[in-house]
Amino acid sequence: MLALLLTAAWASEPKIPFERYELSNGLQVILMEDHHLPQVVVDTWYRVGSKDEVPGRSGFAHLFEHLMFMGTFRLPGSGFDKLMEAQGGWNNAWTMEDATNYYDVGPPNLLETFLWMEADRMQQLGEAMTKEKLDLQRDVVRNERRQSNEDRPYGMVEIELTTAMFPPAHPYEHSVIGSHADLEAASVEDVQGFFSSWYVPNNASLVVAGDFDPVTTRAWVEQYFGTLARRDLPARTAPAPTTRPQKASVTITDQVDFPQLNLFWHSPAKFETGDAEMQLVADLLGAGESSRLYRRLVDGGFAQEVDVFQYGLQYGGVFGVSVIPMAGVSVEKIEGMVTEELLLLANAPPTPQEMERLRNQHAIGTFEELEPLQNRAESLNRYWAYTGTPDWLGKDVARFAAAKPEALSAAVAAWLKADLASRIVVTPEPPAAVEVKQ
Amino acid sequence: MSRSWALGLLLCVPALAFARSKPPPSAPEPVVAPAPPPDPLAGPPVVLPAVAFVPPAPEAAALTNQVPVWVIPSPTLPIFTIVVTVPGGSQLDAVGKEGTAALAMEAMRHGAGALSGPAFAAEVERRGLTIDGAAGADGSYLMLSGPSDQLAPGLDLLADLVLRPQLKGGEVKKARELLIAGLQQNLAEPAYVASRTANALYWGKDHPYGRPTDGTTVGLKKAAPGDVKRWHKAAWQSGGATITAAGDVSATTLIPLLNARFGAWAAGKAVLPSVPAAPAHVGEPIYLVDAPDSAQTGFYVAFPGLKIGAEAEATTHVGTVALGGTFTSRLNALLREKRGYTYGVRAAMESMVGGGTLVVRTRIRTDVTAPALVDLLGELDGIRKGITPEELVKAQGAARQDVVASLESQGGTAGLFAGYLSTGRPASALAAEMAAVAAVETAAVAPAMGAWDQAKAVFVLVGDRKVIEPALRELGFTNLTVVVPP
């Protein structure tokens, strides 16, 4: 059986076959068979992320993700990892602004174990929490911040980006990794409260993917998750739409040899109108060596690196352009060139050849992305979380295939206005003068 | 097994006792509380044995000029990947011109056949194709991926790169500037600096494996367009070349397409320099590279390792996984999960054609660099005594899962098998390796773990010297030498 049914024509609608049902406690269950390889994936998506953190607890959702591996009464210590690794399984997790995702991967004989472990920690992780566990993972997370941001060239931009773009108290106003001070302040009571509030079956969806028997698996899911209690979720209030950044200009110093120019704008929310067009704009400007900014800046000898992205989230998105100039080229000169290219695109749509490239690149990128089983499992959960149905791959591909060149120009004109940009510049400093580090 | 399981049993006992002590029948019927339902989560389920997994074997063929071709068909998606390898890599860089191979591989993609650099890139991207490539110490590769209806035009472009790169002066200059800028960026990363420095110290700065494959700023500046052309002519010959294809392709359709484009690839074979053994390291100092104000210290430790295909490969592999190959490995369990010193630590085998190393790499919080080193040495002492049966089973399971993960994508499949074909191993090599790992016995691992001997290793620490050096000395690490990275 093919897990991903495609025809050779890119414009046709691809589909990931699955079945979905809901337990009485509200847990969404999605089963996706693929017997191509002897492997199963259990992907659990909780609809809680850094946007749900309370003031003074930035980084908490991600810290909590780490704590989910610290053991329960039934499976104490590092039993979660030990039990699955003992049989060739492995796991990982990630946290972003809107969600936290956990996945277990391994041979099919581990499927029942995966389901039992996920249900076990969904039920009793909070009551098994201790200060020792919290302190340990607090240290690990702070090491992650040092490695991913503080000691990584230009790594502090993503920390500064959030306060530059979003107003105080906005759900996206702080970084996912959080501040050292807030991480230090987190308590066991915070952990238990967060678990009790958000880690409930009616706030989660569970994808089982791979080489399994659906009848047996349904029985296991009911057996292990069916008795978990539903709880009311905290009320959420969507923030007012934001179109203007909080800070027009920010300068960071770092131990780097070259400056970096970053320009950020607010942009459409994930999967909402305009999101696909802005992703295609990002690709047109910065994906590949035939993209406009690469040719103008890198081929032209003005820059060594160009990165352009559209990052859609539940309450809005961020569009970014990052450029590292060649030695001797000023960020002002680069900024002028970027602005010219944006104006050019706002005033004249992409050529048919450019649209052909964008559509082909996007189609092949989508299918390559969906090759690994875990990626397919995660995509079903993502579609469910953002659109209300896992069955959205076809619509996702179709929105890119249907995008009109004029719509790309209109999106640039509407969203990427010069006076709506936040400019973050990284400037090289001698090591002794480095700032922002803690 | 678990506290709540025991608690469940205790709750049941009073209920049973109460039922047995109920009054005689003449008395009113008591209300008997029903026994609580069994906890469905009481204990972990029994794990049944894994079903045997036999990996696919490639279809082996050859072009008219004897270039071997392996095809691993998998028509589940309409996409393909093709990898072309040659045995010439950075070992062909002239002394003083380190980076020539990297520069040539970058410049090759800046114009080939009749197409200029920008036109070539536009043609590749317009068709939804990608072409990547790189040079390593033992060889070079180009990898073509894309939709299967673009196979023939993709092969045209790939053949132009292999056989007809333009390597014009202006494109070489542009490629050089990009590589130098990228190198300067990398040199700001402690972990990168640690590995680059350790390789040079372990193998020797003029050894084929000691010279950085991505070159040096000086070497890249000295590598002229003529050097780049000479490198390409020497390295990209059909003798020793291999082609591996995976995905929505079959040998029946692919071989004629390849013969039409690569069949006339001129015979000839790169003359490769000999690879001397690594110099012996006995009781060397700990090498420090100063990275002022760094929040973490980059660790890279190199031990004597194995050549590709060495007899002890399977036993060394499982022992290395137990030491630092998975999340619950000894090093990660101690340095991350128990101490909280790091975000992660890994031990790995770095095996090449002419030799290899065993390595430990991590980033440790600056203020605990010295105690982390003490812990690391303790774990090395431990692993030399061997591993437990549980660790063996875990390592064997991880090895199998690694293969499955590679086979999930066409790129991973082609890359996996290209590694075997390009190093002269048979089509059955993957299955044989998996069988060898599955057959390893616990007692056989300890002898192989003798390789993790710190007395024969090169330790490189890249961090804030003013903080870590006094702390190291205080814990007795007095044999320290400050070095500058190559």
Image (tube, grey):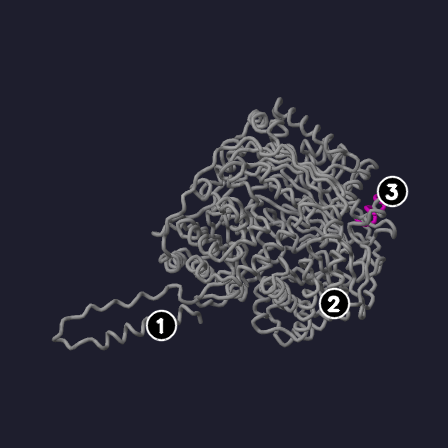
Q: Are the residues flagged by discs 2 and 3 in contact, CB closer than 8 Å?
A: no
Q: Residues within 10 Å of mark 2 (few under 14, many from 20)?
A: few
Q: Is residue B460 left or right of residue A196?
A: right
Which label sits in the foreground, 2 or 3? 2
Q: Are the residues flagged by discs 2 and 1 in contact, CB closer than 8 Å?
A: no
Q: Earlier in the sequence, mark 2 or mark 3?
A: 3
Instruction: Please state which of residues A49 and B104 is positioned toward the viewer in this rendering.
Output: A49
Q: Residues within 10 Å of mark 3 (few under 14, many from 20)?
A: few
Labels 2 and 1 in the same subunit: yes
Mark on residue A357? Answer: none
Mark on residue B226? Answer: 3
**Residue, disc 1:** B9
Magenta residues?
A: B225-235
**Residue, disc 2:** B474
**Residue B482 screen position, x and y as percent:** 81, 59
Name above or below for residue B26 compared with residue B300: below
Q: Is residue B481 left or right of residue B426?
A: right
Q: Is residue B157 left or right of residue A420?
A: right
